[in-house]
Amino acid sequence: MAIFYYNPSPYGVASLKGAQAEAQKLGVKLDAFDANNDPQMQSTQIQDAITTGKYKAFWVWGLNDVALTPIINKALQAGIKVAAADYTWGPLSSQNVLTASSNPKLVTTVGQSIGAESTNLIAAMNAACKKQVGSGHCNIAFLPGLANYPTDTVRENAMTAYYKGKSNYTFTILPPGMYDQAASQKVAQTYFTANKNVNVFATFGDQMAAGAATAMKLVGGYTPGKNIAVIGYGGAKEAVALVKSGTWYATLGLYPVSESEIGIAALNDALNGKPTANLVNIINPATHPAIIDQAYLQAHPDFVPDWTLEGGIG
């Protein structure tokens, strides 16, 4: 098998380690290809892997599903089993609701819907605003991941549309943090130096929230858990600990290790003629919650995070 994963970020590495652990458990030889956030590189990697003729299955974390679709179709035509991570395969419109258009040509899709991610972020930010300012005006600063990254853009547009015209909120999108802690710290430091009245800070990645929290310390005037609510995204072990302590307000759940375990197992089953679920929504309130806040952790004291900000398995 081959895994094609996003990048060498902690999330990307965790997705790789989850796949490697499951492959080792099943006795599967797994080769890994890191696209380093470059959709064109990923396209080339998959095309080259098809050409070698050595792979029976692909586990794909697609950077640009639309552009990759013709190449994935070539893989399917070559008899390669394919499974997709994170979102329903195809155009962005099909990714808004995970269950709307599962792809029968793929062995399985394991993930969650972009639409639900946007809704959950809005719910978390509004709850944080209520905690910080009650019914007063709330200033929200949001740090995205990559400029013009399709799935980021869909979520940003949904949140912007929601807050447009709502007089009790100001919703500001910062320059991208590149899903990198150091880059996010730099962006946040510039922003917080110039803006002293932010009530809620949220982002698409726990590592970016960590970078922003460091920037808050350097700039001064902000104390997470007191005069500003911080919302991460990822459900990483370190973020969950900060939520539990009250330093961060919440983190949203992502499950790269679990997704890879399910995806590799499904591919192995398909290769052995066993039935597989065509669609797996990774979000499960009991074990894989969408929003991880203090209330959830108090109600589920045995919750185990999926991964760590070092790229490990939680």
Image: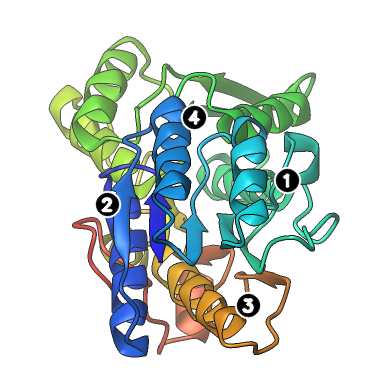
Relative depth, front residue between 189 and 38: 38
Residue occupying the point 41% across, 50% down: 4
Circle 4 residues within 10 Å: few <14, some 14–19, many ≥20: many
Circle 3 residues within 10 Å: few <14, some 14–19, many ≥20: few
Work out how far the residue at label 4 is from the one at label 2, CA to CA, in angstroms.
20 Å
Work out how far the residue at label 2 is from the one at label 3, CA to CA, in angstroms.
24 Å
Q: Which residue in the structure is indicated by mark 3?
A: 285
Work out how far the residue at label 1 is from the one at label 4, CA to CA, in angstroms.
22 Å
Element on which disc 2 rests: helix
Element on which disc 1 rests: loop
2 vs 3, front mark: 2
Q: Answer with the quarter of the image where residue 234 lies.
A: bottom left
Work out how far the residue at label 1 is from the one at label 2, CA to CA, in angstroms.
23 Å
**Res. 141 visible in picture:** yes
Q: Measuring from the top left, give residue 256's x and y in whole percent.
A: 43, 63
Q: Is residue 47 left or right of residue 277?
A: left
Q: Which residue in the structure is indicated by mark 4?
A: 142
* Residue found farthest to the left: 218
In the rendered view of the protein, which quadrant contains the C terminus? bottom left
Q: Which amino acid does the dot numbered 2 rest on? A: Pro
Q: Which residue in the structure is indicated by mark 1?
A: 95
Earlier residue among tags 1 and 2: 2
Earlier residue among tags 1 and 3: 1
Picture colour scheme: rainbow
* Residue found farthest to the top: 194
Check contact, mark 1 vs mark 3: CB within 8 A.
no
Element on which disc 3 rests: loop
Earlier residue among tags 3 and 4: 4
Q: Measuring from the top left, give residue 262's x and y in whole percent.
A: 52, 77
Placement of 62 over or under 38, stated as above or below: below
1 vs 4, front mark: 1
Q: Measuring from the top left, give residue 195's x and y in whole percent.
A: 37, 15
